[in-house]
Amino acid sequence: MRDERLTKLAQTLLSHSVKIKEKDVLMIRVLDEGIPLAKELVRLAYDKGAHPFVRLMNSEIVRAEGLGTTKERAELWKNWEENIWKQVDATISIIGEHNDHETSDIPAENRRIMQQVMKPVQDYIVNKLRWVLLNYPTPAMAQKAGMPTDKFFDFYFDVCSMDYEKMERALQPLKELMEKTDRVHIKGPGTDLRFSIKGIPIIPCAGEYNIPDGEIYTAPVRDSVEGTISFNTPTNYQGTTFDNVKLTFKNGKVVEASANNSERLNEILDTDEGARYIGEFAIGVNPYILNPMNDILFDEKITGSFHFTPGQAYEDANNGNQSTIHWDMVCIQRPEYGGGEIYFDDRLIRKDGVFVLEELKGLNPENLKS
């Protein structure tokens, strides 16, 4: 029996996110769980006259390959992938991991090899194709969210199927304000951070690249970041979970970094030169996502949050920073998480997670919910 919620989600992904057209080549990638959604995508893509293909992946196999990889193997992999992706118009990536720590013991050197060799392929996918990334609901995700499985599934479909066209309209005044802004000042517990966004493009996100969605991003002028930031949500990166991450910046560079696992944190930040500079600054606005679940596709959209990202900048909001990592770290500024303020050119625009300017109030949860 077909789940109409999956059909609705598949329609959103094809029509709104990647805008599939007749004769488009669509690559659907599934990691672990997600076959029911992939089947709906294939069916609806055929209805649109497109050519869908499905690639099934498994986290345990990814781990086995990573444990023994070499540069020679990575180069072969890159050559194969380059040939495939040059024939693709759009891609939908579905992540339904059973265990997000499955690859945590892949050696750091092996990760570095894979990331550096495959970076041109990843850059091509991100910058040249129409793409969207989403998680598929699993009991493991429900557990991270602290919810019973059936209630989490209901929550998932509420979040993923919200009115993204309404969100897109509500983001426009914030986009226009950020385009006129030079100096950003963020204050909160353990946080006093200043940087410039002058001249960097502003990109609103309302269901085009991520589902769920709800953010607006840019990048700081690379050398402008000064001060300290303390993150109050856990963050999982390369199979390791970090808590209480604190970063101190001078001339744009992370000069001090601490967390519950400071050694591993600094090891990742030493991956390459760009890993200690920031490639993204974004504000989260999804009204249905309130609390962190250590899943970045959800956590970076939390209403009343912002995220700050060591590593690679996006091509469409490029500050020149290059890196093989892109690590979104989230801070929530609602009162129950300690509060905080964001100022644009010394003007308060958000306090304790609530937009205070009249033209931005459409982004507050009571106005943004369908």
Image (tube, helix red, strand yellow):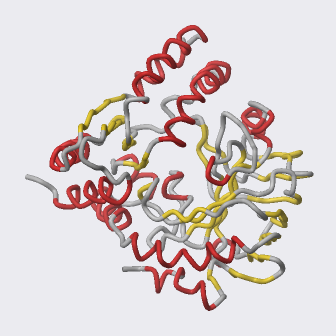
Q: Residue at x 76, y 62 (%)?
A: 199
Across and down, in percent, residue 164 comes to: 40, 69
Q: Residue at x 67, y 19 (%)?
A: 109
Across and down, in percent, residue 353 comes to: 63, 77
Image quadrant holding the C terminus, namely bottom left
| Vertical placement of residue 73 versus 60, above or below | above
Residue found farthest to the bottom: 358
- Marks counted in the figure total 0
Across and down, in percent, residue 152 comes to: 34, 60
Q: Residue at x 11, y 53 (%)?
A: 2
Query: In the image, is 344 to the left or to the right of 353?
Result: right
| Vertical placement of residue 334 versus 89, above or below | below
Residue found farthest to the left: 1
Query: In the image, is 209 to the left or to the right of 4?
Result: right
The image quarter containing residue 42 is top left
Q: Residue at x 41, y 25 (%)?
A: 60
Residue found farthest to the front: 23
The image quarter containing residue 304 is bottom right
Residue found farthest to the top: 72
Query: In the image, is 107 to the left or to the right of 147?
Result: right
Q: Nearer the viewer, residue 165 or 20?
A: 20
| Vertical placement of residue 310 versus 105, above or below | below
Across and down, in percent, residue 34 comes to: 29, 42
